[in-house]
Image: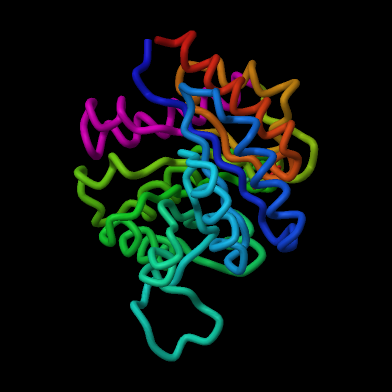
Amino acid sequence: MSDRKPFLGGNWKMNTNRTTGSDLARGVTDGLISVDGVEPALFPPFPYLLTVRAILRDRGSSIRLGAQDVYFQPDGAFTGEVSVAMLRDCGTQVVLVGHSERRHVLGEKDELINRKLRTVLESGLDAVLCVGETLDERTAGHQDIITARQVKTGLADIPASYLERLVIAYEPVWAIGTGKTATPQDAQDAHAQIRQLIERSYGKDSAQRLRIVYGGSLKPDIAPDIFAQPDVDGGLVGGASLNAADFVALAKAAAAAGRAKR
Ligand code: 13P
């Protein structure tokens, strides 16, 4: 039993251009027109936010517009960075924070991620906090410690009232873009652990309401078994979100899994 509405994010990463991104947004929007029971969101690169927003608006779509990152300062001399106010101005509703590529390719630490997350949630926007262990950490048997640290530090000084606007994405780094997926049981175990951590800090109600989604080489053929797990509330998709038919199939699978748990 779960009242949590599945969330499915399409993280386009540093892919698409204005033409292919527009085609993709149209394809996804048209494919999801009569699909309910899932909350889809698209995360295009910053330069295409307004283009995707216009497509979603023209079609009256309820797909949410997301950004892949943000900086915590409101404005000023921070060359190359983008503020929450700028994202709002472009119609962004939800922001990814702490994606593993930001952590491991671009060197972001838990403290910076926490400042970003606080900034997003304080501004009234929704956020997706990404956590997950690397292959080395998993091989050493440290995955629980790493995930717990990322969740705890990421959520430092975040009040319970903000959790309604938060999704946590469990994305094991070794599964991202590698074609390797966590087994449904591994995903369930990690999600259950995260929900327990939330329960300890914020209480049972908050923990039961929080959506925790899986990311890492999700494809339409393997996703239903993962989405069916009791503590998995949808997904965050990279590669497969660049194909409209695959993303639509994943959204339908997430919606079906959500219905089956009600
Ligand atoms: P892939 O689906 O390409 O493995 O990427 C997952 C991811 O990083 C989503 O944020």
Taking the view exactly as shown, the residue that stands out farthest to the front is 58
Q: Residue at x 25, y 32 (%)?
A: 206
* Nearest to the observer: residue 136 or residue 238: 238
Residue 193, quarter of the rendered image: top left
> Could you tell me residue 209's position as x and y percent?
30, 28
- Magenta region: 184-212
> Could you tell me residue 229's position as x and y percent?
53, 17
Image quarter where the N terminus lies is top left
Residue 192 painted magenta: yes
Q: Residue at x 48, y 27 (%)?
A: 38
**In this picture, is 40 found above or below 183?**
below
Image quarter where the C terminus lies is top left
Confirm whether residue 99 shows in the render: no
Q: Residue at x 36, y 70 (%)?
A: 85
Taking the view exactly as shown, the residue that stands out farthest to the bottom is 77
Q: Residue at x 54, y 63 (%)?
A: 50
Q: Which quadrant of the figure shows ligand 1?
A: top right
Position of residue 154 in the picture relative to residue 51 (left or right): left
Query: Magenta-highlighted stretch: main secondary structure?
Result: helix
Residue 191 painted magenta: yes
Confirm whether residue 110 shows in the render: yes
